[in-house]
Image (cartoon, rainbow, N blue to C red):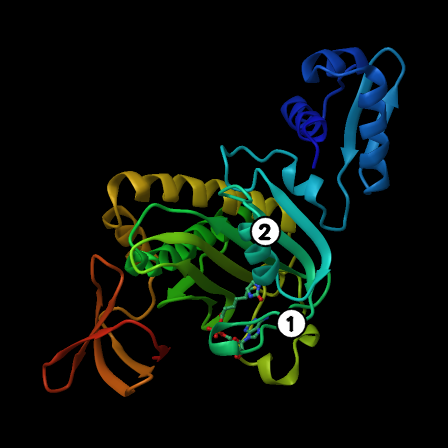
């Protein structure tokens, strides 16, 4: 996205559906009226309906139905999360694209968004079903100055940001299943995958992948997911705007991330607990080293799950799949 395009979208967002004259836009952005006009044509090609009225100027009457980078940008009020958006209709995996961009010195907060993934993945090379036109498949690039062993806290932070974004944008409250799932009525609505590029004492980058089911209907899921997956639209009964949810996520994530960098994990932990499912109840954790069953005590200040086994021994769980 060019700088002019960004400023143009900010001006239209600020005007909130009102008219802006070509000259006012040119002055505001610091470019020629011809440049303004060229970018307005660009927006039209993307599916924006830009109304032009003599002596009044331009206004955005409708945003595109398809997801586009500019549509996400319209009204995004963050300092750096999502300020650099890399949108593609189809990619293999947004994680892969984000990794390449990170090696290419993309700035912190760069967000890769795709309308479809042909090789979306979950943890341990599991598949992530990412059909076209229905969900949010995105990866966020971060470069936090924290020790590598603290990176899993960012998964929990992202889960809180997603839960809050869904709440704000769609009015439903998901539960977080440690460490990386968001559930509604027990069914998975979002999965999170955090990948780390680091040396032993220094993080190069963290890429947080988020897959959110938004407008799928039950028939859009393959057989094996029908009983375990859900979408925002299936829960609310109406289609939701993916770009609005993405903007909400960016705003929430930025707020939490800045708080985390300043104050540490504790305030995030409190928020996380308010969305957590099954704390205090029985839990079964399938780990690399076998199954641990017992009462879930909560998470430590570092985001590690604690389960009290039936013999009273407290187990620290760093990575697992949970059943309730
Ligand atoms: C996750 O893994 O839940 C992390 C998913 C992360 C996906 C995002 S999309 C953007 C970015 N780019 C990528 O390539 N990935 C990230 P895990 O906890 O391992 O769960 C994977 C399991 O979830 C699968 O084995 C299925 O059972 C189930 N699953 C697959 N697709 C699903 C979907 N669309 N909705 C709900 N469940 C799904």
The residue positioned 56% from the left and 70% from the top of the image is 230
Badge 1 density bin: few <14, some 14–19, many ≥20, Cα 10 Å:
some
The residue positioned 55% from the left and 81% from the top of the image is 227
Most distant residue in the right direction: 54
Q: Residue 283: where, in percent of width, then height? A: 28, 79
Image position of 290 with respect to 207: above or below: below
Evaluate whether residue 290 shows in this view.
yes
Q: Residue 182: where, in percent of width, then height? A: 45, 64
Q: Quadrant of residue 197?
A: bottom left
Q: Secondary structure at mark 1?
A: loop
Looking at the rendered structure, the number of numbered marks drawn on it comes to 2
Instruction: Give the left or right position of residue 55, taking residue 116 as reference.
Output: right
Mark closer to the chain start, 2 or 1: 2
Residue beneath disc 2 = 101
Query: Quadrant where the N terminus lies?
Result: top right
* Camera-side residue of 235 and 46: 46
Badge 2 density bin: few <14, some 14–19, many ≥20, Cα 10 Å:
some
Q: Quadrant of ligand 1?
A: bottom right
Q: Residue 300: where, in percent of width, then height? A: 20, 62
């Amino acid at each position: 996205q060019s700088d002019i395009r960004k400023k143009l979208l900010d001006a239209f967002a600020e005007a909130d559906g009102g008219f802006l004259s070509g000259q006012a836009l040119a002055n505001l952005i610091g470019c020629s009226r011809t440049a303004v006009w060229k970018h307005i044509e660009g927006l039209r090609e993307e599916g924006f309906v830009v109304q032009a009225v003599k002596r009044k100027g331009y206004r955005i009457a409708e945003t595109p139905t398809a997801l586009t980078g500019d549509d996400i940008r319209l009204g995004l009020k963050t300092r750096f999360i999502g300020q650099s958006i890399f949108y593609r209709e189809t990619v293999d995996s947004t994680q892969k694209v984000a990794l390449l961009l990170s090696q290419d010195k993309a700035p912190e907060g760069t967000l890769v968004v795709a309308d479809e993934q042909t090789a979306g993945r979950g943890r341990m090379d599991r598949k992530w079903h990412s059909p076209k036109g229905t969900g949010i498949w995105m990866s966020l690039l971060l470069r936090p100055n924290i020790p590598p062993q603290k990176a899993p806290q960012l998964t929990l932070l992202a889960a809180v940001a997603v839960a809050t974004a869904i709440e704000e944008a769609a009015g439903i409250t998901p539960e977080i299943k440690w460490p990386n799932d968001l559930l509604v009525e027990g069914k998975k609505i979002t999965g999170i995958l955090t990948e780390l590029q680091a040396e032993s004492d220094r993080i190069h980058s963290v890429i947080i992948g988020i897959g959110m089911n938004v407008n799928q209907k039950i028939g859009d899921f393959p057989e094996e997911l029908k009983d375990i997956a859900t979408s925002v639209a299936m829960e609310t009964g109406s289609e939701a705007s993916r770009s609005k949810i993405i903007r909400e996520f960016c705003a929430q994530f930025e707020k939490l991330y800045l708080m985390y960098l300043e104050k540490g994990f504790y305030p995030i932990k409190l928020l996380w607990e308010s969305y957590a499912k099954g704390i205090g109840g029985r839990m079964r954790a399938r780990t690399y080293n076998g199954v641990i069953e017992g009462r879930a005590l909560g998470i430590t200040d570092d985001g590690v799950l604690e389960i009290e086994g039936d013999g009273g021994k407290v187990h620290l769980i760093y990575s697992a799949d949970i059943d309730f």
